[in-house]
Image: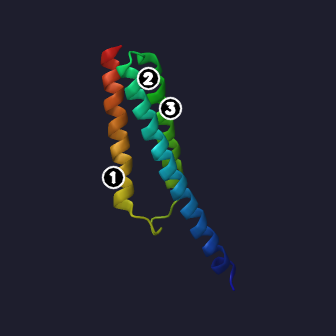
Amino acid sequence: MSASAAVAPIRERTEQVCLALARAELEVAFSYLRLAEAESHGGNVAHAQDLVSKSQMTYLTAVRYIDSLTPDSDVDWCELQSDFHELFGAIRRMASLLALAS
C-alpha cells in the first residue's frame, strides 16, 4: 500500500469530521440568533447585540471548517451553501433590527 493510499481514508475521515463540526457551528450560530431575538423582544438590546456578535464569530468558525474540505469532497455543496447563505442573511437582518432599536 502506498503512502497516498494509506492517507486517503484519514483525509476522508478528517473531512467528515470537519463537515460535522461546521454543521454543529451553524446550529450554534442559529441558536445565538434565536436568543438574540428573544432578548431584543424583552428589551435587552445590548445583550441581543452581544449574541449577534457571537453568532457572527461562530459563523466564521464554521467557514474555517469548510475551508479545509476539498472540492471533490463527498458533500452536498448546494445544501451547504444554502445553509451558510441563510445564516448570513439572518445575522444581517438581526443586526439591522438591533441597530434600529438602539
What is the x, y in percent for residue 73? 48, 67
**Label 3, label 2: how many angstroms apart (C-alpha)?**
9 Å
**Label 2, label 1: how many angstroms apart (C-alpha)?**
24 Å
Is 24 positioned to the left or the right of 43 in the image?
right
| Amino acid type for the residue under numbered disc 1 | Ser
Regarding residue 68, the answer to whether it shows in the image is no
Q: Read off the residue under disc 1.
A: 82
| Amino acid type for the residue under numbered disc 3 | Lys
Q: Secondary structure at mark 3?
A: helix
The answer to whether 1 is drawn above or below residue 69 in the figure is below
The answer to whether 25 is drawn above or below residue 95 in the figure is below
| Amino acid type for the residue under numbered disc 2 | Gln
What is the x, y in percent for residue 77? 38, 61
**x 35%, y 21%: residue:** 41
The dot on residue 54 is: 3
Disc 1 residue crowd, few under 14, some 14–19, many 20+, Cα 10 Å = few
